[in-house]
Image: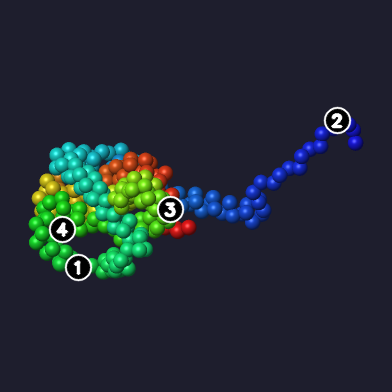
Amino acid sequence: MTLGTKREAPKTRGPVDSRGYRIFRIVNTVVLIGVVIVTLYPFLNIVARSLSDEAYILAGKVNIVPRGFDLTAYELVMSDSLFWTNYRNTLVYTVVATLISIVLTTCYAYVLSKPQLKGRGVLVGIALFTMFFSGGLIPNYVLVTSLGMKNTIWAVVIPNAISVFNLLVMKAFFESLPTELEEAAAVDGLNTYGILLRIVLPLSKAIIATMVLFYAVSFWNSWFTAFLYIDQQDLLPVTVYLRNLIAGATDAQQSGAADADVVQAAATLQAVTIVLTTLPILAVYPFVQRYFVSGVMLGAVKG
C-alpha cells in the first residue's frame, strides 16, 4: 500500500431502490398523471365551450381549444345589472354563512372533544342523527317561514350552518391536541374561553382554513335553498340567476321564440355558468391549499 494514498469512504446507500420500489414509482407516476388528465380535461372542455361558437359545439368539434371564438354568452349574462346584484348577494351570503358556520362548528366541536363533559354521548348522537335523517322539505319550509326568515339572508345561512362531517373532523382534531397545554393554561388563570381563544385556536389554523374552504365552496355553489326560500329577484344568489337563465334560454330555443342572440348563446350558457361560478373559488383556493392536506389529516387521524 502506497503511503499517502487515501482510502475512499464506503458509499452509503440512500433509500431502498429495489426493483419493486422502482416499479411502484413508475406505476404511481402514471396513475397520478392519469388522475390529473381526467380531472383537468373536463374543466378545459367547459372553458373552451364557453368561448366557442354554437355551431362548432353542436357539431361536436370543440375539445379543449375554443373554435369560432364567441363571447355572446358572456355579453348576455354580464350586461344585465341583475347579474351583478345577484353576484354581490352570493359574496355576502358566502362570507356571512361561512363566518357563522365556522364559529358554531368550532364551539360545538370543542365542547364535544372533552371526554369529561356530561351528556357528551347525547350531543354526539344528536349530531349523527341529523347526518342521516331530516324533517323533510315541507316541514323545513314551514319552519323557515314561521320563523320569519323567508326572503332574508338567514333563510340561506341558518338551515345549513353546521355540517356534521366538518364537525366530526374538527372534534377529532381538538381531541388530538395535548391536554397538558390546556392544563398549564388553566393553572395560569385562563378560563375556558381564554383557553379556546388564546391556546387552541392559534394551534388550529390548518383545520380552520380547511373548514373555511369546505363551507365557502358549499355556500357558493348552493342554489336550491335560495330557490326555495327567496322569491325576490334582487335577493337571489348568482347561481339561481344563472340557473333561471339557462332554463329560459333552453325553453325559448325549443319553442322557437328566442331572438338570434339568445339562440346562438343557448348552447354555451351552461359552460358560462360553470366558469363564472368557479373562478372565485379557484382564486381563493391557492391561498388555503397549503393548509388543506395537513388540516384534513390532522382532523381525521388521532395519534
Q: Residues within 10 Å of mark 3 (few under 14, many from 20)?
A: few
The three-letter amino acid code for the residue at tag 1 is: Gly
Classify residue 208 as left or right of residue 12: left
- Name the residue rendered at 15%, 67% in the picture: 139
* Secondary structure of the residue carrying numbered label 3: helix
The answer for how far apart the CA atoms under marks 1 and 2 are is 88 Å
Q: Residues within 10 Å of mark 1 (few under 14, many from 20)?
A: few
Residue, disc 2: 4
The three-letter amino acid code for the residue at tag 4 is: Leu
Residue, disc 1: 136
Indicate the position of residue 235 as horizontal and vertical percent values: 13, 48
Between disc 4 and disc 2, whose residue precedes? 2
Disc number placed over residue 180 in the picture, else none: 3
The answer for how far apart the CA atoms under marks 2 and 3 are is 59 Å
Residue 141 shows up from this direction = yes
Between disc 3 and disc 1, whose residue precedes? 1
Dot in front, 1 or 2: 2
Residue 255 shows up from this direction = no
Between disc 2 and disc 3, whose residue precedes? 2
The answer for how far apart the CA atoms under marks 3 and 1 are is 44 Å
The answer for how far apart the CA atoms under marks 3 and 4 are is 48 Å
| Residue that sits furthest to the top in the current view | 4
Indicate the position of residue 85 as horizontal and vertical percent values: 15, 42
Q: Residues within 10 Å of mark 4 (few under 14, many from 20)?
A: some
Dot in front, 4 or 1: 1
The answer for how far apart the CA atoms under marks 4 and 2 are is 89 Å
* Secondary structure of the residue carrying numbered label 2: loop
Dot in front, 2 or 3: 3
Check the image and tell me how it is coloured: rainbow
